[in-house]
């Protein structure tokens, strides 16, 4: 099986310290801090990386589902919004909103919605995040595809 790796280095206190996140492949390394995670400070944060992973995985899962049904998408653009909220357990990812727009010639909005829900159920990042209270999905056809 494939193994993927990333690392984090943190230095200092929680609120005044800071760290760096690095992907094992080396294609991304970025600073993170208390302000970048819990406020609107500069830098990245684990939740943003989860959002990127979820959007990427879902786009590929939807492509696989469409391919399996005989449809070749021209493009799929997915945005994932990870909501960080407070619960009795402390800061928690309370919801993830997926929004995807696909350009698929000859596809109806209803068929896209059905196949997108199937992709959400099979996306390995969606399955890994099953402990999140709600993962919602909104799927729409890109304008160019709906004109065919």
Image (cartoon, helix red, strand yellow):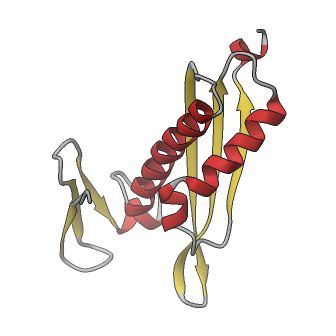
- Residue 134 position (above or below residue 116): below
**Residue in the image at 25% along x and 55% along y:** 31
**Residue in the image at 39% along x and 54% along y:** 49
- Total numbered circles: 0
**Residue in the image at 57% along x and 18% along y:** 74
Considering the image in quadrants, where does the C terminus appear? Answer: top right
On the picture, is 27 further left or further right than 62? left
On the picture, is 109 further left or further right than 129? right
- Residue 59 position (above or below residue 119): above
- Say which quarter of the image contains residue 65: top right
Spot occupied by residue 48 in the image (x, y as percentages of width and height): 44, 54
- Which is nearer the eye, 47 or 54? 54
Spot occupied by residue 99 in the image (x, y as percentages of width and height): 65, 42
**Residue in the image at 57% along x and 31% along y:** 67
Spot occupied by residue 39 in the image (x, y as percentages of width and height): 47, 63
On the picture, is 129 further left or further right than 31? right
Considering the image in quadrants, where does the N terminus appear? Answer: bottom left
- Residue 148 position (above or below residue 23): above
Q: Residue furthest top?
A: 148
On the picture, is 119 further left or further right than 7? right
- Residue 85 position (above or below residue 89): above
- Which is nearer the eye, 134 or 69? 69
Spot occupied by residue 90 in the image (x, y as percentages of width and height): 52, 85
- Say which quarter of the image contains residue 44: bottom left
């Amino acid at each position: 099986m494939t193994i993927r790796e990333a690392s984090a280095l943190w230095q200092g206190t929680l609120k005044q310290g800071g760290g760096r996140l690095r992907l094992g492949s080396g294609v991304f390394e970025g600073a993170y801090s208390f302000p970048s995670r819990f406020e609107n400070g500069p830098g990245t944060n684990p939740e943003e990386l989860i959002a990127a992973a979820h959007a990427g995985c879902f786009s590929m899962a939807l492509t696989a589902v469409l391919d399996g049904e005989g449809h070749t998408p021209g493009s799929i653009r997915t945005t994932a919004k990870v909501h960080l909220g407070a619960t009795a357990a402390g800061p928690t990812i309370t919801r993830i909103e997926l929004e995807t727009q696909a350009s698929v010639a000859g596809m109806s909005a209803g068929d896209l919605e059905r196949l997108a829900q199937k992709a959400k159920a099979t996306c390995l990042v969606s399955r890994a995040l099953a402990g999140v209270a709600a993962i919602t999905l909104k799927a729409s056809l890109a304008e160019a595809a709906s004109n065919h």
